[in-house]
């Protein structure tokens, strides 16, 4: 059982990781079309959904989706739902991996083949997504604490740079009074999505409580990070030029220079911090996907491995280990195939679909949880 | 009335200490009026025998004997129970004669077989190290930890060696689940011969495949005592000057006993230095491979040119160079370990001068490589506990390998991988590697929330 600060780490890592990938692109494309109101709407909506979702899942203390679904839903409904959600999480991890391979080739090692980079990433992700949920939470904390100082440094460096054009930023603000767009809301809300990982990580939490003195940080930090994600690239590339960059934040970091350090270009520091955080995020996604998928085979009593690390040797664990191996192998094969098949446009398109689909599936999930809590209360009363 | 009180003291003491394996009780005299109670490990039993036991048979009169005991130097009446238990734990003997009881000073101070700590030397602070006798070692611990909560349980291991083992812990503070696991695992050990603490550590650790040490093996009594106060379990062993402490966390291996002595600012700085050393020794060889062959554009151009210029004469790729030099370094370390003291300096001279100077002049390795290898070796030795030092020595090759395959990406992959692996390690059910910066504060908050 872990303390509740790990809940906020789950939120935080998915928040900061979204600076690099899909979110800023969506925000920047609609910078003249109501981006500010979209951000505000997204922040309000997501804070609410995050609050409701967490309050709901707390009712099932120490249980993940597989246990909850298998107990309170008929099997014919539980299994497809679990598979659907696990595919969802796998795709989230895949998109992140694919775009990071793309970034690596574009910014760091142009002469290395995509498949080689992907293999390297996969070795880590496949190995690490099978470890215990609590271990992943500890790793998130360590990686975040190592990376946050570097990120703050880069941000401060970016903001105090004389080349940062505040006029461009102000120029964007003149489009404040435009109608918000659904696409942008969907994109911005993806940044908040870390709490959904409670689907599995709820197993590790005990008496998780949301207190106002911590929770107010969620909307505030969310708003600030989204604004930074949108405005800093604009300050460097200009209101129009910014849309030429696919990974606008990497281009921004590449505009910065550390004159007095052995590594001159900030982009490498930026790359290193974001690489480690992305890898951890992919591990989170794939771990959740894996556990959800295993959940539809194991029935009610499955609850992951025991805390002291001694693995069971029963028939059931062997079976689930086989399932795990098959899934991970299939996924790795798909990734290694896709990495040189998909081009950047297709990848961005897939990312966009994913964002929209995720946005619209959030409400049904919450409704489903409300139903489950209601069922649980009713069965408890009997 | 007085009879009641005296027997009370003896009974009370028996109740307190009966479960200690080094507690002893002797009844003397024809009518068993005289009773001795003491702790074997801290009491000079020779003295007790000579001056307490023998006279009791020489003098027939109990009264005369009592008078004799009362005049014994360093003797007081035992009337305060608190003083009594403190005295016994320090090494006094309780002599109960009929209604009266006396505390005799029979403290044993082990210093004969006790040497200085060699492997974990420190600048200031206690220098004593464990000796190779378990009795002496228990004495060393009891002298530093004088409370009746300290429990010692003994057992023997090894069907041929019959090595005596003592499980030492503080009854009040110990984590009972850890204690149970230690006992269970010790019971399961089935071997013929047990000769060193490291061996025992291997037998009682749960995983067959391990990279990082799961328990601290130390030669310092003060480290054992410090860990006992933290609720850990120590395992002492006969015939070796090392004790095992379980469970261990990653940061334990980076703490030296000096940290307690220095002023806080200095000790924090020293700790920081050790982690920087860890980082350097792990990543520097990998970074060299990366910068020389894979991603030279990362560094400033002057620095890259410097490396390239220094490597101009070297006829093979950078990873060969790194492997070659690091291997030579490992040979040098191993050789100077095993060599007799008289020839020892020769190895370092030959190694240092010939390898360093001549190899660069011959163009087999670059100058920068030599600097790097020494930096790696020196920073490896910064790690205070040698078991972790050995692990780190091995792990850096993994990083070189990934750097060779994927460049800077590979280094990051292996660093994140090592963090992931470390986070998944448990030592006796306790997380091995995680940040505990906010832990104490949050615990307070937790209790607050509950109340």
Image (tube, coloured by chain):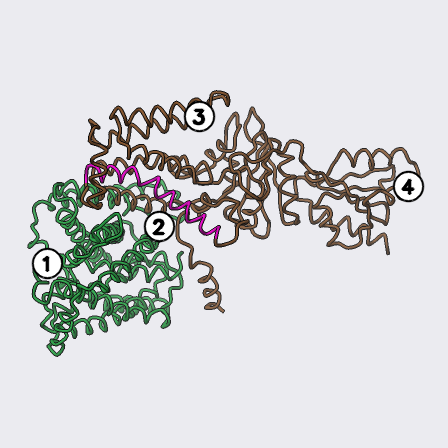
Chain colours: A green, B brown
Is mark 4 in CB contact (under 8 Å) with mark 1?
no
Residue at the extreme bottom of the image, as rendered: A177
Residue B171 picture location, percent across and down: 60, 49
* Chain of residue at mark 3: B
For discs 4 and 1, the disc positioned in front in the rendered view: 1
Q: Callout 2: helix, strand or loop? A: helix
Q: Residue B291: say if magenta.
A: yes
Q: CA distance from mark 4 to mark 1?
A: 102 Å
Residue marked by disc 3: B336
Marks 3 and 4, the one that precedes in the sequence: 4
Determine whether, in the image, residue B307 is placed left or right of residue B46: left
State the residue at coordinates (23%, 33%): B310
The crowding category of the residue bearing disc 2, from other C-alpha atoms within 10 Å (few below 14, some 14 to 19, many at least 20), is many
Residue marked by disc 2: A135
Residue marked by disc 4: B62
Q: Callout 3: helix, strand or loop? A: helix
* Chain of residue at mark 1: A
Magenta stretch in the rendered image: B266-294
* Above/below status of A37 relative to B160: below
Which of the pair B184/B81 is nearer the observer?
A: B81
Q: CA distance from mark 2 to mark 1?
A: 37 Å
């Amino acid at each position: 059982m872990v303390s509740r600060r790990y809940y906020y780490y789950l939120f935080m890592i998915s928040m900061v990781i979204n600076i690099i990938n899909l979110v800023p692109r969506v925000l920047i494309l609609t910078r003249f079309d109501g981006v500010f109101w979209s951000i505000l709407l997204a922040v309000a909506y997501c804070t609410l959904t995050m609050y409701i979702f967490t309050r709901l899942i707390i009712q099932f203390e120490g249980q993940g989706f597989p246990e909850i679904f298998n107990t309170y839903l008929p099997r014919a409904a539980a299994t497809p739902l679990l598979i659907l959600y696990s595919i969802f999480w796998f795709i989230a991890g895949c998109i992140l991996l694919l775009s990071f391979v793309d970034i690596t080739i574009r910014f760091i090692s142009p002469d290395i083949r995509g498949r080689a980079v992907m293999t390297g990433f996969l070795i880590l992700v496949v190995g690490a997504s099978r470890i215990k949920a609590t271990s992943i939470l500890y790793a998130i904390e360590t990686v975040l604490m190592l990376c946050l100082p570097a990120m703050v440094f880069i941000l401060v460096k970016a903001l105090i740079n004389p080349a940062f054009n505040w006029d461009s930023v102000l120029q964007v603000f003149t489009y404040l009074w435009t109608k918000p767009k659904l696409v942008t809301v969907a994109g911005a809300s993806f940044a908040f999505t870390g709490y959904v990982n409670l689907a599995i990580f709820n197993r590790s939490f005990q008496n998780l409580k949301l207190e106002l003195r911590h929770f107010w940080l969620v909307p505030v930090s969310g708003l600030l990070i989204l604004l930074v994600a949108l405005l800093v690239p604009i300050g460097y590339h200009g209101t129009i030029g910014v849309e030429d960059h696919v990974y606008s934040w990497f281009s921004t970091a590449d505009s910065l220079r550390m004159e007095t350090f052995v590594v001159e270009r900030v982009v490498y520091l930026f790359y290193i911090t974001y690489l480690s955080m992305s890898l951890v995020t992919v591990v989170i996604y794939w771990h959740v996907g894996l556990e959800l998928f295993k959940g539809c085979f194991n029935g009610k009593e499955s609850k992951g491995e025991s805390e002291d690390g001694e693995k069971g040797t029963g028939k059931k664990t062997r079976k689930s280990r086989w399932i795990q191996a098959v899934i991970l192998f299939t996924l790795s094969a798909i990734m290694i195939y896709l990495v040189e098949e998909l081009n950047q446009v297709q990848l961005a398109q897939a990312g966009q679909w994913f964002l929209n689909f995720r946005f619209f599936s959030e409400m049904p999930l919450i409704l489903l949880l409300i139903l489950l809590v209601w069922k649980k209360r009713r069965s408890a009363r009997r | 009335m007085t009879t009641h009180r005296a027997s009370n003291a003896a009974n009370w003491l028996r109740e307190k200490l009966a479960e200690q394996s080094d507690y002893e009780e002797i009844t003397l005299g024809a009518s068993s009026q005289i009773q001795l109670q003491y702790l074997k490990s801290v009491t000079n039993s020779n003295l007790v025998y000579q001056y307490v036991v023998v006279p009791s048979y020489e003098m027939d009169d109990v009264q005369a004997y009592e008078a004799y005991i009362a005049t014994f130097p360093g003797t007081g009446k035992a009337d305060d129970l608190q003083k009594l238990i403190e005295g016994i734990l320090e090494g006094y003997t309780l002599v109960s004669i009929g209604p009266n009881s006396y505390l005799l000073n029979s403290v044993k101070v082990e210093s004969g077989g006790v040497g200085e700590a060699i492997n974990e030397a420190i600048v200031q602070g206690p220098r004593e190290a464990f000796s190779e006798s378990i009795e002496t070692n228990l004495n060393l611990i009891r002298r530093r930890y004088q409370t009746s909560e300290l429990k010692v349980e003994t057992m023997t291991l090894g069907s041929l060696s019959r090595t005596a083992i003592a499980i030492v812990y503080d009854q009040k503070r110990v984590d009972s689940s850890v204690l149970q696991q230690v006992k269970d695992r010790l019971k399961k050990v089935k071997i013929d011969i047990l000769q060193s603490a490291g061996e025992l550590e291997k037998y009682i650790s749960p995983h067959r495949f391990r990279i990082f040490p799961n328990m601290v093996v130390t030669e310092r009594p003060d480290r054992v005592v410090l860990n006992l106060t933290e609720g850990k379990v120590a395992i002492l062993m006969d015939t070796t000057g090392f004790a095992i402490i379980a469970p261990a966390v990653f940061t334990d291996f980076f703490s030296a006993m000096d940290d307690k002595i220095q002023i806080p600012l200095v000790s924090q700085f020293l700790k920081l230095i050790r982690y920087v050393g860890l980082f350097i020794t792990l990543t520097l060889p990998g970074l060299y491979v990366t910068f020389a062959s894979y991603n030279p554009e990362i560094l400033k151009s002057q620095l890259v040119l410097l490396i390239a210029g220094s490597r101009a004469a070297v006829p093979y790729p950078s990873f060969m160079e790194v492997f070659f030099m690091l291997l030579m370094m490992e040979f040098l370390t191993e050789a100077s370990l095993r060599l007799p003291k008289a020839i020892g300096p020769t190895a370092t001279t030959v190694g240092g001068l010939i390898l360093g100077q001549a190899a660069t002049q011959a163009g087999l390795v670059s100058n920068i490589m030599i600097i790097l290898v020494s930096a790696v070796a020196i920073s490896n030795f910064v790690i205070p506990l040698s078991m972790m030092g050995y692990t780190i020595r091995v792990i850096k090759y993994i990083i070189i390998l990934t750097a060779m395959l994927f460049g800077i990406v590979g280094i990051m992959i292996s660093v994140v991988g090592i963090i992931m692996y470390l986070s998944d390690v448990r030592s006796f059910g306790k997380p091995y590697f995680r940040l505990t910066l906010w832990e104490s504060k949050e615990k307070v908050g937790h209790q607050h929330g509950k109340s």
